[in-house]
Every structure is written in structure tokens, then in C-alpha cells.
Image (cartoon, helix red, strand yellow):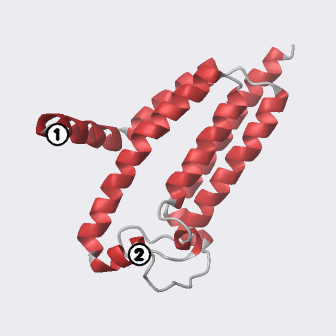
Amino acid sequence: MSATAGSLVRRLGDVLRRRRVFLGFLVAGVVLWLAQPTLRSLLAGSAISALGEALRIWAAGHVEKSREVTRSGPYGLTRHPLYLGSSVIGLGIAVASASWTVGGLVLVYLGSTLPAAMRAEESHLRDKFGSEYAAYTARQAPPMRRAFSPSRALANREHHAVLGLLLAWAVLALKASLSLR
């Protein structure tokens, strides 16, 4: 890749990372508009997205963002459990929507914004924690024992994600009930 193309890709990644929340609301609106849920798709998708949110809650109850290299809970298993949980939620919403178009849109959104966010986060953690983060990524850091903390999950504002998911389920359930009439 040429230096110019590489610079363009980095700038695009930076824009996607910084605008991912706004883009997420935009994509969510389009997803809910295009969704064609059925009772069956809604039940299956809700179960999948609930698993994703459970992973996010578990991670949010362990992480001390920008204060340490967290290695407890799901961070002992994967470097990005919050993003993994978001991906599972996205899959669940796509299944609940019963629309291939929505599935494609969710895939494009997650496939473009989350890798950009992960790269930026890893760069920040490398800069801030240096060899400690390098040891973690190489799976050479000692395990960390810390209990899940509901107050930490609240401090990390995970309740906002829960409320957003409940709202999405409500809209999808309303659309499914209207299609049954």
C-alpha cells in the first residue's frame, strides 16, 4: 500500500472511530426502519443479543478504563470483551430483524467501526502502559483476581447500553405485533 493510501486509510479509521456512536444511532434508526421481525426471529435475536449484553455487563463490572491493564473476568479470556459483546448484540438485532439488508448493514457498521476503535484503544494502552500491556497481549501477564462489581458496571455507564437494547427490542416487538394483524 502506498504512503498516500495508508494515510487515507488511517484518516478514515480515525473518523469511523470518533463518529462510531453517532453512526451507531444512525444505523440503528435505519435498522429499525427496515426490520421485518416475526415472533420467531424476535425471540431468537433477543436471546442472542441478551448474551452479548450479559458479556458487556460482565466486562463493565471488571474494567478500570485507562487506569490499568484489566486482566480479570472476561479480560482474562479476550482483550476486547466489550466490543465482542457489542458484536453479539449486533448479530442478535440482525437475526431479530429478519432482514438480509439489515444483516448486511449491521455487518458493514460493526466491521468498519469496531476494528478502528480497537486499534486506537490498543495504541492508547501501549502508549500508557508499555511493557505491562505488551505482556498482557502476549498472554504473559499474571492473572488478576477481582470480583465483578455492579457499581463499577454502573460507573462505566453500561446501563445506557441496556436501555438502548431494551428500546430496540420494544420497537422490534411493536413492529412484529403490527405485522401479525
Crowd band around label 2 with a 10 angstrom C-alpha radius: few (<14), some (14–19), many (20+):
some
Q: Residue at x 52, y 27 (%)?
A: 105
Q: Disc 1 marks which residue?
A: 7
Q: Residue at x 31, y 43 (%)?
A: 18
| Amino acid of disc 1 | Ser
Residue 169 location (% of width, % of height): 70, 36
- Marking on residue 136: 2
Task: Work out whether 155 lies above or below 167.
Answer: below
Q: Quadrant of the C terminus?
A: top right
- Marking on residue 142: none
Q: Residue at x 55, y 48 (%)?
A: 86
Identity of the residue furthest to the front in this view: 1
Asked if disc 2 and disc 1 are in contact, CB closer than 8 Å, the reply is: no
Of residue 98 and residue 178, the one placed in the foreground of this image is: 98
Residue 123 location (% of width, % of height): 28, 60
Secondary structure of the residue carrying tag 2 is: helix
Residue 127 location (% of width, % of height): 23, 68
Task: Work out whether 161 lies above or below 155.
Answer: above
Q: Residue at x 55, y 57 (%)?
A: 158
